[in-house]
Structures are given as structure tokens and as C-alpha cells.
């Protein structure tokens, strides 16, 4: 149900702007969801590419360490392939391995260690014993390739990286090939790109021991992940990136690449913003962006509808209300050219302007016809009144020439009735509204002009009138006038007593009902309820009853020796126009 009838303001949800914004929202929601999904996919792709970039940069930064460690592995494989032929002659074996170290100055020790921890074939001139090392005992129980850092090895004066690899014969471990290299030989050369340099770079073994660092060891330790052990990052040949808080409290991105799977790894620490490289969008922004686009779309839609449609419709509505209230003519569209003028609104304004002109013209024609009709009706009532006055004058002449009292009385009564009708027509042609008659004014004029009342006044009758303005239409005015005239005539006929008095009252009992009271004092000599004493024909009473019937009213008569009272109640009807016959 529409709640915008009359001057009542429409609910917000029924307004054009609200409806358009609601449907626009429904249309944009799927697009927003698609945009969010695409942004999330784009972010995932950017993050993946950023991870690959960091891994590549870490691998590039660790290229020197990777080359040095892989060189150790290459040397170990070469020695592993030839050591079996040299073990039969330990002296010749040591001599050959000594030449190997002398020709490759980066190595400090090369040798074969048997399962007892004794090395009789090595680059050193004397026999060496490794059995006392805890790591060697673990290696014997669980043979594998390992890298470890030792502060000194075989008399070396600086930290070295020791690599040990199982030597097998027919699938049985017979011993280990051991090679050591100074730590400085691994991390001496730095070929980092200054624009893509990690915060720190370390290499570590699968057991979680740090092999080399670019910075001092204390700084390297402070920049390691706080809640993640290095051994947990050594996972096969898998390269990975993680974001974690360092031991110093900074949030860093860590890139882990395998140098030798399950043996050695490189760990690069990068600033948190380095993972985005300025190209990634946060999840919050990627979620907020479609929402902002939705708000921007709603704002643009609201502005366009309000500026180009709603405001123009409001102006048109104001013009309609002004026309309805004061008949103020609207300005035609295009009178004031505006940049925001819409062709559809202009067309609607032109239609309203044309309609307003037609309404004003038709109303003017109707008012002219009504004025002409009113003039004609007033002329008709005026002429009827004049004709009745002429008839009354003729009857007055006849009355003066008559010698019989009964004839004079009869003619006088007829003359009073004619004058009553004349008064109705005089009131109608003098009234502004021909469809309404003030019954109080009509009765007052009737009392003043009645010859019977005039004669009674000469005899000292006191007349009281209490009349309320009751508006009736002409079809009721005629029988009411004749009713009052007959009641006055009958009342004045029998008025008497010590103080002869007549009273006439007309009152509204409610909005649609009225009561007429006519009463007079009378002399007991005239009291004749059965009509025995009087020679009256009873015509007046018959006419009164007939006029009451025309009024669709009811009459109550109260007659005593002291007073005669007539009370008539009737409905006050409004004017009923005749149904036009088309």
C-alpha cells in the first residue's frame, strides 16, 4: 500500500533514490565479490612471485658459499673414487693426499678415517686419531654426510669447516673421507647486489650448526628466528620462505635454499617490506577496495539521481502544488536553460504546463457559463416575484372593493400566501448563492411583510422571534415559507388574552435536523378543539399538514385555553443537483 498520499511524506524506502541504490547494490555485490576473489588471487600470485624472487636473490647472495661447499663435495667424490687403491700403501696414500692439498691451497686437510677413528692415510705426515670426538661416534652409529665447524683441526690456526662422507665397499661402510676448508675461504668473496642485499646471510648444516656468517656471530645470532630452530628449516631439497620475529624483536622474512640437500643450507634474512617489492596489496586493502568502489558507485548514482531527477521532480511538484493552491501558472520548460535539464523532465513539464493552461481556460469558461446561468436564474426569480406582486396588488384592489367580511378574509389569506411565495423568490434573486437560502432571514421578512401580522400589531400583539441561521435549499424554502405563513395566519386569527403574544423560533437540534415552533396566547372564548363553536372550514390546518409532508417532517400541536402551539421537526437537506442527461 502506498503511504505517500496527500501531503504525507513518503517513507525513505519508497523513494526513488533508495530504490535505485538498493538495486544498484544488488547489481554490484557479485562484481564486488568477483573483485575481492581476483584481488586475493592476485595477491597470492604476487606473494608467490615475491617468494621466488627472494629465493633467487638469496641463492645469488649465497653463490660464493654454495660454490665453495660444492667444491668440497666434488673433491670428496674424487677422493672416494681413488682412495680404495691407495689404502694398501698408507705411506704412498699420505704422500698423494699431501700433494693434493699442496696443489689446492684452499684445503687444509684431506684424509681417510677408518671406523676406529684412526687416520693413517692423510695429508698430514703423522697418524691422526678422531675417535675422541662426539660427532664421529654419532657418525659411526649413523653413517651420513655431514658438515661441522671446528675451531681448530689438526693444528690449524683458524676455524675450519670439516666435511665427512662415508666410504663404502659393496654397500658396507669401511670408513670416512674427511676434508677441511678454512671458514674464511668460503665467505671471503661477496658479490651481492647492493640494491638487493639481505640483512644477514648464513650457511648452516642439517644438524642446525652455523657454518658461515657474513656479519659477526653475535649479530647473526640476534637475527635468527626466535621461535624456529635451524634444524627445522633443513628440509630435504625444499626451498622456502617464512615470516617470523627475530631474536632481536624485528619482523623479518627468511629465505632458505638447499646448497647440498640434507647436508648444507643457506639462510637469508630480509626486511619484511622486501617480500612485496612495492607490488603486493594487503588483504585489508584488497577487501576495502571493492567496498570503496561500491560506496563511490552509490555516491555517483545518488548524486546523478538527486541532481538530475529528484530535484527536478521536486521543483515540478512545487509548481503543481502552487497551481493547485493559487492557480499560479508554471513556467514552460526551456525558459531558463540549465545544463542539468533532462529531456524527459522537460517534456513532463511541458505537458503539465499545457494541462494547466487547459484547466485554467476550462475553469474560466465554466465560471463564465455559471455567471450567465446565475444571472438568468436571478432574472427568472425577479420576474416571478414581480408577477406575484402584481397578483397581490390586484387582489388588494379586489379586497378594497369587496363589502363582505368573509370575502375580504378569504382574499386576505390568499394574498398572504402569495406574498410568502414572493418573499422566497425575492430572497433567491438577492442571494449570492442560488442553491442555499437562509431560512431565518426568510421567516423574518415574512413576519414583517405579512398583512395579518401588521394588522395584529395594530391591535397590540407582542411578537417574539428566536431564529437561528438554518441554511436550506430552495425546494425546502417554498413549503417552509407557506407553512410559516399559514401558522402565522391561524395564530393571529385566535390570538388573545390579557397580554396577546406570538413567538416564532427556529433552531438546529443537530447538524441535519431543525425544529420550528409557532405559538400564541389565546382567549378561552375561542378555545374550540372540536370545531363546534367556529365556522372555520379547517383549510389552514390542512395546508399546514400538507406543507409538513412536503418537508418530510413531523408535526405536534398542543392546544389549551391559554395557548396554541405548533412544533414541526424536519431534516435539513443539502442541495441535490439533478443528474445531467447526456
Image (cartoon, grey):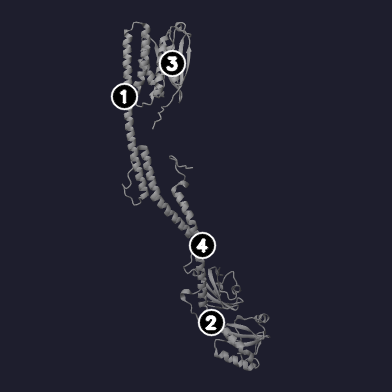
Q: Is residue 82 visible?
A: yes
- Give the number of the disc on residue 544: 3
Residue at image coords 46%, 76%: 194
Distance between the alpha carbons at the discs numbered 1 and 4: 88 Å
Q: Secondary structure at mark 4?
A: helix
Mark 4 lies on residue: 37
Upstream in sequence: badge 2 or badge 4: 4
412 left or right, relative to 189:
left
How crowded pointer 1 is (Cα within 10 Å; few <14, some 14-19, many 20+) is rated as few
Distance between the alpha carbons at the discs numbered 4 and 3: 96 Å
Q: Secondary structure at mark 2?
A: helix
How crowded pointer 3 is (Cα within 10 Å; few <14, some 14-19, many 20+) is rated as many
153 left or right, relative to 498:
right
Q: Quadrant of residue 478?
A: top left
Residue at image coords 45%, 40%: 5
Distance between the alpha carbons at the discs numbered 1 and 3: 30 Å
Q: Nearer the viewer, residue 534 or 498?
A: 534
Rendered position, 574 above or below 127: above
Rendered position, 401 above or below 121: above
How crowded pointer 2 is (Cα within 10 Å; few <14, some 14-19, many 20+) is rated as few
Q: Secondary structure at mark 3?
A: helix
Q: Secondary structure at mark 1?
A: helix
Distance between the alpha carbons at the discs numbered 2 and 1: 129 Å
Mark 1 lies on residue: 379
Q: Tell which tag, 3 or 2, sits nearer the viewer.
A: 3
Distance between the alpha carbons at the discs numbered 2 and 4: 43 Å
Q: Tell which tag, 1 or 4, sits nearer the viewer.
A: 1
Amino acid at each position: 500500500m502506498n503511504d505517500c498520499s496527500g501531503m504525507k511524506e513518503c517513507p525513505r524506502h519508497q523513494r526513488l533514490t533508495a530504490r535505485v541504490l538498493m538495486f544498484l547494490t544488488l547489481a554490484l555485490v557479485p562484481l564486488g565479490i568477483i573483485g575481492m576473489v581476483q584481488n586475493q588471487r592476485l595477491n597470492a600470485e604476487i606473494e608467490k612471485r615475491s617468494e621466488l624472487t627472494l629465493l633467487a636473490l638469496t641463492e645469488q647472495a649465497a653463490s660464493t658459499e654454495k660454490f665453495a661447499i660444492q667444491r668440497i663435495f666434488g673433491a670428496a667424490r674424487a677422493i672416494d673414487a681413488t682412495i680404495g687403491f691407495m689404502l694398501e700403501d698408507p705411506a704412498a696414500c699420505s704422500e698423494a693426499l699431501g700433494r693434493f692439498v699442496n696443489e689446492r691451497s684452499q684445503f687444509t686437510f684431506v684424509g681417510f678415517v677408518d671406523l676406529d677413528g684412526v687416520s693413517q692415510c692423510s695429508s698430514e705426515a703423522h697418524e691422526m686419531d678422531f675417535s675422541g670426538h662426539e660427532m664421529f661416534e654419532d657418525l659411526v652409529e649413523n653413517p651420513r654426510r655431514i658438515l661441522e665447524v671446528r675451531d681448530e683441526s689438526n693444528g690449524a690456526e683458524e676455524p675450519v669447516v670439516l666435511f665427512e662422507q662415508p666410504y663404502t665397499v659393496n654397500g658396507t661402510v669401511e670408513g670416512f673421507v674427511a676434508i677441511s676448508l678454512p671458514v674464511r675461504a668460503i665467505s671471503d668473496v661477496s658479490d651481492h647486489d647492493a640494491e638487493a642485499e639481505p640483512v644477514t646471510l648464513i650457511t648452516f648444516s642439517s644438524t642446525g650448526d652455523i657454518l658461515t656468517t657474513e656479519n659477526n656471530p653475535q649479530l647473526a645470532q640476534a637475527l635468527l628466528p626466535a621461535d624456529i630452530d635451524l634444524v627445522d628449516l633443513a628440509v630435504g631439497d625444499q626451498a622456502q620462505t617464512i615470516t617470523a620475529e627475530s631474536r632481536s624483536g624485528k619482523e623479518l622474512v627468511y629465505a632458505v635454499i638447499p646448497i647440498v640437500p640434507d647436508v648444507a643450507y643457506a639462510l637469508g634474512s630480509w626486511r619484511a617490506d622486501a617480500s612485496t617489492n612495492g607490488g603486493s596489496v594487503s588483504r585489508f586493502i584488497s577487501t576495502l577496495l571493492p567496498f570503496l568502489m561500491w560506496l563511490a558507485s552509490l555516491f555517483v548514482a545518488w548524486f546523478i539521481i538527486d541532481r538530475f531527477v529528484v530535484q527536478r521532480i521536486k521543483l515540478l511538484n512545487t509548481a503543481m502544488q502552487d497551481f493547485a493552491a493559487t492557480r499560479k501558472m508554471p513556467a514552460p520548460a526551456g525558459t531558463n536553460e540549465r545544463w542539468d535539464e533532462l529531456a524527459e523532465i522537460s517534456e513532463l513539464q511541458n505537458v503539465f504546463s499545457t494541462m494547466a493552461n487547459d484547466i485554467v481556460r476550462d475553469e474560466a469558461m465554466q465560471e463564465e457559463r455559471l455567471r450567465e446561468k446565475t444571472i438568468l436564474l436571478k432574472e427568472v426569480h425577479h420576474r416571478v416575484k414581480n408577477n406575484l406582486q402584481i397578483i397581490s396588488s390586484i387582489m388588494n384592489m379586489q379586497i378594497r372593493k369587496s363589502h363582505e367580511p368573509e370575502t375580504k378574509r378569504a382574499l386576505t389569506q390568499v394574498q398572504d400566501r402569495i406574498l410568502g411565495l414572493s418573499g422566497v423568490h425575492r430572497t433567491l434573486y438577492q442571494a449570492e448563492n442560488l442553491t442555499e437560502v437562509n431560512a431565518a432571514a426568510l421567516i423574518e421578512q415574512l413576519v414583517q411583510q405579512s398583512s395579518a401580522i401588521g394588522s395584529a400589531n395594530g391591535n397590540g400583539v407582542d411578537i417574539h422571534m428566536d431564529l437561528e441561521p438554518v441554511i436550506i435549499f430552495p425546494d425546502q424554502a417554498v413549503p417552509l415559507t407557506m407553512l410559516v405563513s399559514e401558522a402565522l395566519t391561524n395564530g393571529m386569527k385566535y390570538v388573545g388574552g390579557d397580554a396577546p403574544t406570538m413567538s416564532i423560533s427556529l433552531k438546529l437540534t443537530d447538524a441535519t435536523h431543525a425544529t420550528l415552533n409557532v405559538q400564541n396566547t389565546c382567549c378561552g372564548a375561542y378555545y374550540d378543539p372540536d370545531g363546534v363553536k367556529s365556522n372555520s372550514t379547517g383549510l389552514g390546518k390542512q395546508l399546514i399538514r400538507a406543507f409538513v409532508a412536503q418537508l418530510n417532517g413531523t408535526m405536534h400541536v398542543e392546544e389549551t385555553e391559554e395557548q396554541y402551539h405548533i412544533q414541526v421537526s424536519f431534516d435539513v437537506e443539502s442541495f441535490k443537483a439533478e443528474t445531467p442527461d447526456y
